[in-house]
Amino acid sequence: MSYIREHKKVFYINLLTSGKLQSHLADVEEQAQEMFDRLMNQREKREGITEKLKADNQMEWVGRMNNLRSAVTETVNAEVIFV
């Protein structure tokens, strides 16, 4: 909400005065979560981040998952949150 309030003031005021702010925020949250989950699953498979890797080398698995999570978060922010 703070992003909309600070960077898209007219849009924020229109949503607020029309009573649609909360539903808009809920829709964006749902879209972002769905996209995040889908991208994480796709990229885990593509990059070979498996449960076997987790069992065999936990430190490598954690590092790769952290990198993946950061990359996917950036993508979701750019395509859903900050548009």
Image (tube, helix red, strand yellow):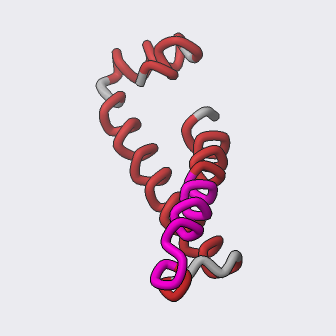
Which residue is rendered at x = 55% and y = 74% of the image? 41
Above or below residue 39? Residue 22 is above
Of residues 80 and 60, the one nearer the viewer is 60
The image quarter in which residue 28 lies: top left
Above or below residue 11? Residue 23 is below
Q: On the rendered structure, is 22 left or right of 76?
A: left
Q: Quarter of the image containing the C terminus?
A: top right
Of residues 45 and 5, the one nearer the viewer is 45
Which residue is rendered at x = 49% and y = 72% of the image? 58
Above or below residue 62? Residue 53 is below
- Specify the segment rendered in magenta: 54-69
Across the whole image, how many numbered discs are drawn on residues?
0
Image location (x, y in percent) of residue 61: 55, 70
The image quarter in which residue 60 lies: bottom right
Of residues 58 and 12, the one nearer the viewer is 58
Image location (x, y in percent) of residue 9: 53, 11
Q: Is residue 35 visible?
A: no
Above or below residue 65? Residue 55 is below
Which residue is rendered at x = 35% and y = 28% of the image? 21
Which residue is rendered at x = 61% and y = 63% of the image? 64
Q: Residue furthest bottom?
A: 52
Q: Quarter of the image containing the N terminus?
A: top left
Image location (x, y in percent) of residue 36: 52, 58
Image location (x, y in percent) of residue 57: 54, 77
Q: On the rendered structure, is 71 left or right of 22?
A: right
Characterize the magenta stretch by its predominant secondary structure.
helix
Of residues 60 and 4, the one nearer the viewer is 60
